[in-house]
Image (spheres, grey):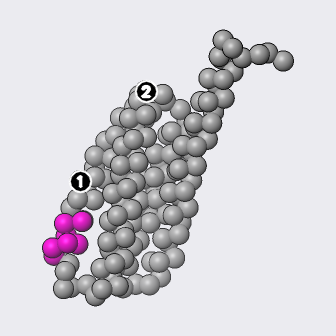
Amino acid sequence: MPNTSRFLILAAGISGALAVAVGAIGAHALEGYLDAHAMETYTKAATYHFYHTLALLGVGIYAKHRPSTMLTWSGRLFIIGMVLFSGSLYLLALTGIRQLGMITPLGGVAFIAGWACLVVNEQRTLNSEIGNSPNSVSP
């Protein structure tokens, strides 16, 4: 699992750098090029890209200290979500190809599943800690 946490942290670093770059492009180079709706779409892509980059970093750091399969899946799903959700919105804003919008919900589902993996991980950790507690009662 240590390699997993390193991968997730590395992926977060790359994603963060890309998020800053595409955000800067959107704020400076695309102003005046995109109409208001396309700019709003592009901004939404960048916002979710940033949020989930930070989530990915948090999962990577957490996995370094408490590795688990659920944390690995959470990180993977956040990456998939960023590619599908933010990627499709970036492309939609830049190209106007409306069919790309059909991909976006798949990325949203990946984001939700990534967050759900965190919940499952914490529930398992809590159950494990309660079961190992010196005050726990055996049936």
Q: For mark 1, does the 10 Å Cα neighbourhood hold few (<14), some (14 to 19), or many (20 or more) residues?
A: some
Q: Which residue ends up furthest to the right in the rendered image? A: 139
> What amino acid type should be assigned to the residue bearing mark 1?
Ala
Looking at the picture, does residue 65 appear above or below residue 51?
above
> What amino acid type should be assigned to the residue bearing mark 2?
His
Residue 111 appears in the rendering: yes
Q: Which mark is residue 2?
A: none
Residue 4 sits in quarter:
top left
Residue 7 x %, y %:
37, 39
Q: Which of marks 2 and 1 is nearer the N terminus?
A: 1
Residue 91 appears in the rendering: no
Residue at the spot 53% in from the left edge and 50% down from the top edge:
115
Residue at the spot 40% in from the left edge and 84% down from the top edge:
97
Q: Which residue ends up furthest to the left in the rendered image? A: 28
Number of marks present in the image shown: 2
- The secondary structure type at the circle numbered 1 is helix
Q: Which residue ends up furthest to the top in the rendered image? A: 134
User: Which residues are drawn in magenta?
Assistant: 22-29
Q: Residue 17 carries which label?
A: 1
> Which residue is under mark 2?
65
Residue nearer the viewer, 128 or 81: 128
